[in-house]
Image (tube, rainbow, N blue to C red):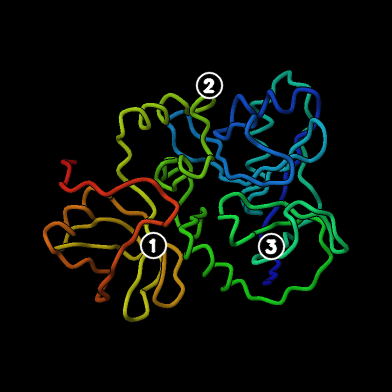
Amino acid sequence: MAIIQLSDRATIRVAGPDAEHFLQNILTVDLDRLEPGMVKPGALLAPQGKILFDFLISRDGQDAFLLECRAEIADDFLRRLTMYKLRAKAEISKQDQAIVVIRWDADSIASETDSTGFWLRDARFPETVRVERSYSAQVSPDAETAEWTRLRIAHGIAESDSDYALNDAFPHDVLLDELDGVGFRKGCYVGQEVVSRMQHRGTARRRVMIVDAQEPLPAPGTDIKANGRSIGTLGSVDGTRGLAIVRTDRVGSALADGMQIMADEVALSLSIPAWAKYTLPQADAED
């Protein structure tokens, strides 16, 4: 089992009799599918459908939720939530604790309370890896943050700042649609019309892919090209592996035509995360 602590995270608590109804009406995630003892990804979108804030959400007792996000965006996120609250009977507050503990390859049952604290299963990862998060655990880390990055890369889990910029990506781009971070059967939420149209028309063109190379990858943010044409951008990097958000139509065309995919002078191979259901088009679409 590996354990790390993240000090660059914050939690926002939303509690009250209207908390669930309020959040259900503005966030992408379907709270009817959020079980106690788990954290799930979600986003608050701009009306145009792009991600303004990404987070992990969990239940925190009756009529209460915790939204975990990057610490540097927490104050803006809180203000945006407050702006939407209007007359809803819900209190919104940023929590004082700033340490998130993550463990994986754990033997314990997800969401159990043990001598170290209360653990929640991170639903972005398969059960076999047993990734769990805690906002109360008293435990010493035995792994480095780089190992967490390596785990995210291996499973194709993108996060803002590391892999994409806020207000520059749609939920489909970062696979929120396949991670159950978007509720397609619930009512309206901010940006819902754009996201639903992308889903039903199948117009999502950018996707997260796993990058492999025979030599160390260049820095995050490096342009990825095929035959001199940009097809995406490199995100998180760990040695010879990384994540990228790419145009799937252009990747499909490059592979079909036998073109080499490059980042600077490094040759790349791209693969779809094992759990993802999307496929690569075989022909390049027009811009």
Which is nearer the eye, 287 or 203?
A: 203
| Up/down of 21 relative to 214, above or below | above
The location of residue 276, given as percent across then percent down, is 42, 50
Which image quarter: residue 189? top right
Name of the residue lying farthest toward the top: 87
In this image, 89 relative to 103: left or right? Answer: right
Residue positioned 53% across, 40% down in the render: 180
Residue 179 image offset from top left, x and y in percent: 51, 45
Q: Earlier in the sequence, mark 2 or mark 3?
A: 3
Binning the other alpha carbons within 10 Å of mark 1 as few (below 14), some (14 to 19) or many (20 upward) gives many
Direction bottom: furthest residue: 215
Instruction: Look at the numbered disc 2 and give the secondary structure of its residue.
Output: loop
Residue on which disc 2 sits: 188
Residue named by callout 3: 102
Q: Residue at 21% x, 53% y: name it.
A: 252
Q: Say whether disc 2 or disc 1 marks the residue closer to the N-terminus.
A: 2
Residue at 61% x, 71% y: name it. 145
**Where on the picture, by quarter, is residue 61?**
top right
Vertical order, 73 against 22 (above or below): below
Task: Name the quadrant containing residue 269.
Answer: bottom left
Q: Amino acid at mark 2?
A: Cys
Nearer-the-camera pick, 172 or 108: 108
Q: Nearer the viewer, residue 258 or 69?
A: 258
Q: Nearer the viewer, mark 2 or mark 1?
A: 1
Image location of residue 128, percent across then percent down:
59, 60
- Could you tell me the amino acid type at mark 1? Ile
Q: Secondary structure at mark 3?
A: strand
Q: Give the side of residue 13 with respect to residue 200, left or right.
A: right
Q: Which mark is residue 210?
A: 1
Label 3 and label 1: CA atoms lie apart by 22 Å
